[in-house]
Amino acid sequence: MDILMKKNYLTVALVLALITFCIKQTFAQNDSIPSSVQQISLTFENSTIKDVLVQIEGLTDYRFYFAEAWLGDGLVSGSYENESVKTILENAFDDTALNFYILNDKKIILTKNNIIYDELPNGFFNEDKEDTIVEGNEITTQVITPVFYDLGNTARPASLETVRIGKADAGTNKNRFTLQGYVRKQNGEPIPDLSLLVKGKGTGTVTDENGYYRLELAPGQNLIQARAMGIQGAEREVIIYNDGTLDFELSESLEMLEEVVVQADAARNVEEATTGTTQIESEESKNIPLVLGERDILQVAKSLPGITSAGEGAVGFNVRGGKTDQNLILLDNAVIYNPSHFFGIFQALNPFTTKGVEIFKGNIPAEYGGRLSSVFDIETKDGNVEKFSGEASIGPVTANLALEIPIVKEKSSLIVGGRGAYSDWILRSLDEESLRNSSASFYDGIVKYNHKFNERNDLRVTGYYSHDGFSITSDSLYNYSNRGFSLRWDKKFNDRNTGSLIVANSRYEFGIDYDGESNNDFNLGYDINETGLKLKLNYFLNDRHTLTYGLSGKIYGANPGKISPEGGESIVQRISIPKERAFESGIFVSDEFKVSDRFLVDLGLRYSFYAALGESEQRIYEQDVPRNEGSRIDSVQYGDYEIIKTYGGPEVRVSARYFLLPDLSLKASFNNGYQFIHTLSNNTTVSPIDTWKLSDTNIRPQQGNQYSLGLYQNLKENEYELSLEGYFKTSKDVLDFKTGAQLLLNETIETEVLQGEGQSYGVELLLRKNRGRLNGWLGYTYSRSLIKFDSQFGEERINNGKYFPSNYDKPHDISLIANYKFTRRYSVSANFVYQTGRPVTYPIGSYQFNNAEYVYYSNRNEFRIPDYYRLDLGINIEGNHRIKKFAHSFWTISVYNVLGRNNPYSVFFVTDNGEVKALKSSIFAVPIPSITYNFKF
Amino acid sequence: MAFFVVVGCYVGCVEPFDAKTESFGNALVVDALLTTEFDRHRVSLFRTYPFEADGPEAEQGALVSITDNSGTSYRFEETEPGIYLSETPFAARQGTDYTLDVQTADGKAYRSATVTTPENVPIDNIEAKRLFNDKGEEGVSILLDNALPSETPNYFRFEYEETYKIVAPNWDPFEFEVVHYIPCDTIPYQVDIKVQTEERKVCYGSATSNAVIQTSTVGLTENKVNDFNIRFIGRDNYIMSHRYSILVRQFSQTQDAHSYYERLGDFSSSDNIFSQIQPGFLEGNVRSISDESEKVLGYFEVAAVEERREYFNYDDLFPGEELPPYVVNCATPGNPQLYSFGYHCADFRVCDGACESPLIEAILAGNVVFHSVNENGSADQPGPYFTLPSPCGDCTKLGSNIVPDFWTE
């Protein structure tokens, strides 16, 4: 039944409330209703309630009093033999919001929602007046929580809609009712992450990805505010009588888009139990000035506390002092191994089709496993199921087009996005002699299909591909690509049980084509492929427990390297490092347990299991001697899919939130995890030709623990968010390599690997202003990231086996993102970053050898490059908002690195013509202006 | 890979900076090479030095010896500071193991790992070929081929010594002669010209390799080195303008030595500006016996050596084509004045102004050579002679005027 009511009902309801009162006054003195109530026999089949009432009137002396509009179009059926009118009416009104009151003079007054109480609550007149109580047979007297609608005491806008929910049930003595429902756009698209706040009560919730919400309300009058980015805010006055449903249909708001840059849900900061989560919406990141005008949520992520990278040209993220391989990056549930283009300068995600990213850097939910530091859950938009629409942009580096194509109206839609770089533009603009002969280009494409079969079944299918090609010298061409595919089926079994089934496949590969003068031309290739299945179920057990449970499994296949001759003359020998296979799985259960109104605990448990599988040859090395070719004593051959070695263990994911004040909460969490695949990189920063290695007999999985504790406060109705979070992490068996190790095409990689310990800790402070002309955030992080590689053998020790700072240890990190809106159309934004310079290995002298000069390196990372800072400015101009206009346009004019700061990216020493030269590199050393034109249609 | 820095630094750039030694680490550097050539072999012992220093300090007064597996010991003597030569000439024998021992004057002892002489591989061919290199630049590559007698892969390191004929493009039979150069004298300054007496037209320049050049046959189907680029000479390099000769020395290395040189090269070069190989202490095969934690740099290499010389003429590869530009610009003659504008005398032979003669100073410094006489001096060009930068007329500024012994035309 549609409970969304039109405004003119309001007056009826008010009148009724008055009548109710009058009745109480009028009949309060009357004798009680005779206990013998007239019994009748009656049969009706698919009749309207009005018909039933007419029939009853025909059979009895009862006369009904009601407003016809209340009755609705619902059909009822029933067959009664000598049943009381009361029972018949109770049954007939079961599915409606109707209540009734039988007066002793054969009048039956129907009410909507309200119960006509025959007893005022205790203390209503400050004293019991038992003599005035009307004793009603129909209605029991244990009324504790009547809903009295306080007329006139609430100031509210004239336009405010009032909604009545549920039918008062005198039997209930609950002091909380559950309101649930869906929030959708006019086109039927669900609105996830919309916050619903109960004004003045300090409670609220957030819609899930299907737009579903669930809210606990105090009986009676509640003012509910709905807010989300890009959505026209709404308020509803809800008078709740019992558990019920309320769906919202909201419209998109263009005005809001300009306003807030990045929006986590209003109350989420303080409400949820999980520590260290961040959300970034792609659309909202568009105002943030970034290099060459490319919208990039992953770059925006780096401006939030706890997420950094080694530098401007470094691929990957270091989350809370973790290595770059410790992040699980999911695009619609498919793993993306390298979500960036061109050495990490651009994201490999289409900003138009990407809805946003949710980052878990603290407590990682139990459903995710296999990576120690974080989960980046990137989601693609659902296509518009109503009308064809699109978005396009032209910027200095790329052109981009995304289309939303409805397939079956209101049911399914296809979203297609394609983006490409104007070939070679970037490198040609790099004023660097060594890159003069270089070229670089990239593209990415995505297709997503969503189909809503019915209210209970949704299907989403995504396909993704990205490709990069670049050459530094004219004879070698490097390329890498990501492929992702996923299928997700969401099913709602009933009000309490929902589930998702996910199938995903991903592949990452890179290759080098070498075509030189000599006869050693070759093709070199690497690829890793994974296919996984995941079943996740949710069970809303009751108001206090929400369970999530399920299992997942994936199969890895990696070709660690192969080289083959190119062309007929090449004498390069074909080498192929044998394929590696593994199975990784997890079983998980978590319970969001609401211990009390103030105390929420999320208890998660996961068991991860990993098996390295054949076919493979595993080398056995002598114990207690340095591992090298010489200490190899045996090797064991394993057959196809034979289990070589298993690893695994329980993982705890616990977090808790306690409200110290209604808008101030304290959270704590602990989690641990296993990681079974590792990147092999002997570079100081990540390079696109780093390979991933699966754990085997000689390489153990990495393990990590994280403890975090934080304080969260929202001020001024969530306009300001303040959070302070500290963490301490330990890890073991993180990988590093012997100095100068050769990793590519190395069959016995374990002789080069060192596995050591990591330790990181930090404090993250974030102040965020979510609304108003000026909005944005200011973040400060103090953090350290240390690693240690100790061994009884000198060749397996780094820095004498003591803790030393990792390549991405940047203790102080300040970032400010601010957006100021002058008018609906014009806004300016600024982005400021300051970071301590990263550690580098710096020589402690030079020496002569073999007729040339070289530098003498000793301990790793003992020095730091100068501090990094940068200011970017942007002006955003929205086209006008005339509805009839064909396209809505948006201009961004930005200048990256306005101060022209020549931030060193790295320092290094080369021996050129026998002499040492100290060199310093930087990526963007001058202000980079750009202009981008976007339009939506 | 070398980086050349352009003026200003824009996007993705590399620029030199003045590195300071933040904390200096003093260590012994051993540079020892024993080859299959019958020679007085050399062991250099120096110390590391800070960036601010001019060069290394020698490790003097050390006891140096090489011992083979039959117990024969070859003693070394210090012939100049830090340079130790074997007392007698000898050659490393195939299949024999050698160990280097060093005892420094302060009593610390160092010993190398035992190194076996690698297999000797003859050079098949050396060829000069005109081509475009991997950066797309035109030039001449010196390419080497060899064929391995056995199936086991071999490792090679190369050094070269190049010698090239230089012909001074503006050589003139006359040279300057400074006749009188006493300021405020009764006689004015005087510069004459006279007939040259020394060979200054044709010389021979030379240079040796100073980068690590190496290759191996690992990963090749045929156990041979084919068209390996030893040296690339850019199209614009004047050294190949006439006749060019290169002596290539091929060192067959052990795998360990090869890997050492490879890491040495990796740590001292940069392939792209986005990522660098993680550098660190480069451990060689010499260690301290007295103190295990003491860091020792350098390497004791035993190598089988082959060498071969190759010549080519510019006309062979670039027939009828214009010569590469000369090393200096000889197109515009200068006209230094005999007296500078500030010339002023206070008294006899007492100058109280700028009395240095620009022309004579340039001649004495060897910076200019005679080009022609300024027949009709003008206000613009008052100097008595036109001059050119000295390499234009004097090849000894770039090389030696003595024909090398090996040189054949």
Image: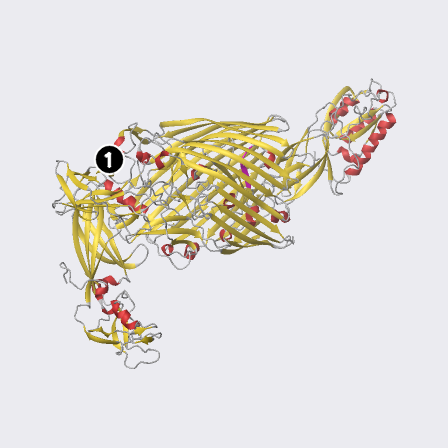
**Relative to B215, A842 lies left or right:** right
Q: Residue at x 43, y 36 (%)?
A: A786
- Check if residue A794 falls in the magenta segment: no
Q: As drawn, is A14 to the left or to the right of A900? A: right
Chain letter belonging to callout 1: B
Q: Using the image, determine if residue A306 lies above or below residue A654.
A: below
Q: Where's residue A752, x and y in %?
A: 32, 36
| Occupied quadrant, residue B374 | bottom left
* Residue at far bottom of view: B376
In the depicted structure, whether residue A465 falls above or below residue A655: below
The quadrant of the picture occupied by the C terminus of chain B is bottom left
Amino acid under disc 1: Ile
Q: Position of residue A462 (x, y in %)?
A: 50, 41
Question: Do we see residue A380 in this rendering?
Answer: no
Q: Is residue A639 above or below residue B301?
A: above
| Residue found at the very far front of the displayed protein | B347
Tell me where residue B180 appears, x and y as whole percent. Answer: 24, 75
Residue at the spot of label 1: B289
Which of B100 and A226 lies nearest the eye of the viewer?
B100
- Over which residues does the magenta segment extend? A274-279
